[in-house]
């Protein structure tokens, strides 16, 4: 495996230590918008050039609009609108509200900006119905979001989106039924459309936990942990920062990080081993997110149930051998 425990031979991700009492949850999507939307080539050129001070940096905050169809029980009240766009003043950190979407999109739980187009992708979360992958065009002047397209995520409680390096495919995670999908990204408009493949760690078996009757995932007692870890539950998908060809998927239900060889041409993910998300003698870790360091061969895994962060080393040589 590329990410693995130190005690294993020739791992590519080796577990180094655990920092206690750390936890992180995504609340917003952050991205730079580019002035020209008339020509995709101009927008791409702007992305490769250093950002100027007069260019806007927008933050889009996504909100839960329904609580009754979620696996967890949020505190507070349901939001009336799903997406709020703010302009960030990078000199003092203040945010100014610019736009509120009027499109009725339920529970856009995760958001991601396209790296070179004024596009935002969101996915909706519900344990009862398949998620939606919604593509939005963002106006760099007003911050207004215009709905461009929507695609069925092919699973429930859709919770994570990752664009590959070439922006040809979107990798999508459905938490409740644990499936991971690879979706085509339209080469001209940039919206997500048809699914190309799916990987199901549960091999088509029914989940032991039922969507219509389940524990509140906001509780972290023994009974809640037991039910949450009765089945596989994929929670994120991230590509390695060096090759962009190895996918890592934290499985909260199994205390594992799943490793895949990712083929962007065929649009497939091929299983290539697993590794523990923390020390071998620990239980109820609950890996939720994984993130690579921007410059070092290091990856960080957030274990939600144990409220810990595991740190892994990335072995480039082992990764090259895996990719052949």
Image (cartoon, rainbow, N blue to C red):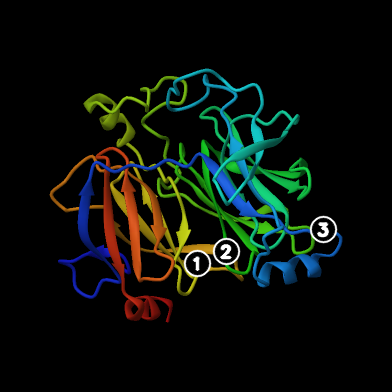
The residue carrying mark 3 is 37
Characterize the local packing of mark 1: few (<14), some (14-19) or many (20 or more) Cα atoms within 10 angstroms.
Answer: many
* Residue 129 placement (x, y as % from top left): 58, 30
* Residue 276 placement (x, y as % from top left): 25, 55
Q: Is residue 46 visible?
A: yes
* Residue 128 placement (x, y as % from top left): 54, 27
The residue carrying mark 1 is 262
- Does the residue at mark 3 contact the one at mark 2 (Cβ under 8 Å)? no
Which mark is in front, 3 or 2?
3
* Residue 298 placement (x, y as % from top left): 33, 66
Query: How many marks overall?
Result: 3
Secondary structure of the residue carrying tag 3 is loop
N-terminal of the two: label 1 or label 3? 3
Left or right: residue 298 versus residue 113 is: left
- Does the residue at mark 2 contact the one at mark 1 (Cβ under 8 Å)? yes
N-terminal of the two: label 3 or label 2? 3
Distance of label 3 from label 2 (alpha carbons):
22 Å
Q: Is residue 276 visible?
A: no
N-terminal of the two: label 2 or label 1? 2
């Amino acid at each position: 495996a590329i990410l693995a425990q130190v005690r294993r031979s020739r791992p590519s991700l080796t577990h180094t230590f655990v920092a206690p009492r750390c936890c992180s949850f995504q609340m917003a999507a952050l991205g730079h918008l580019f002035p020209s939307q008339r020509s995709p080539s101009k927008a791409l050129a702007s992305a490769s050039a250093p950002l100027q001070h007069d260019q806007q940096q927008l933050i889009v905050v996504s909100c839960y609009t329904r609580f009754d169809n979620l696996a967890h029980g949020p505190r507070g009240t349901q939001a009336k609108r799903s997406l709020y766009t703010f302009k960030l003043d990078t000199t003092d950190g203040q945010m100014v509200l610019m736009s509120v979407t009027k499109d009725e999109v339920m529970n856009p739980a995760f958001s991601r900006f396209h790296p070179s187009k004024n596009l935002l992708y969101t996915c909706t979360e519900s344990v009862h119905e398949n998620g939606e992958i919604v593509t939005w065009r963002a106006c760099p002047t007003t911050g207004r979001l215009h709905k461009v397209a929507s695609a069925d995520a092919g699973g429930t409680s859709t919770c994570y989106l990752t664009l590959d390096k070439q922006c040809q495919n979107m990798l999508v995670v459905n938490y409740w039924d644990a499936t991971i999908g690879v979706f085509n990204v339209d080469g001209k408009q940039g919206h997500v459309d048809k699914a190309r493949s799916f990987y199901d760690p549960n091999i088509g078996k029914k989940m032991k936990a039922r969507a219509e009757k389940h524990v509140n995932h906001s509780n972290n007692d023994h009974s809640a942990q037991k039910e949450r870890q009765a089945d596989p539950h994929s929670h994120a998908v991230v590509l390695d920062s060096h090759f962009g060809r190895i996918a890592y998927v934290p499985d909260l239900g199994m205390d594992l990080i799943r490793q895949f060889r990712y083929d962007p041409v065929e649009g497939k993910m091929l299983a290539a081993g697993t590794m523990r998300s923390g020390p071998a003698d620990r239980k109820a870790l609950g890996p939720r997110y994984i993130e690579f360091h921007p410059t070092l061969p290091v990856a960080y895994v957030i274990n939600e149930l144990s409220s810990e962060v595991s740190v892994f080393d990335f072995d480039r040589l082992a990764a090259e051998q895996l990719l052949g």
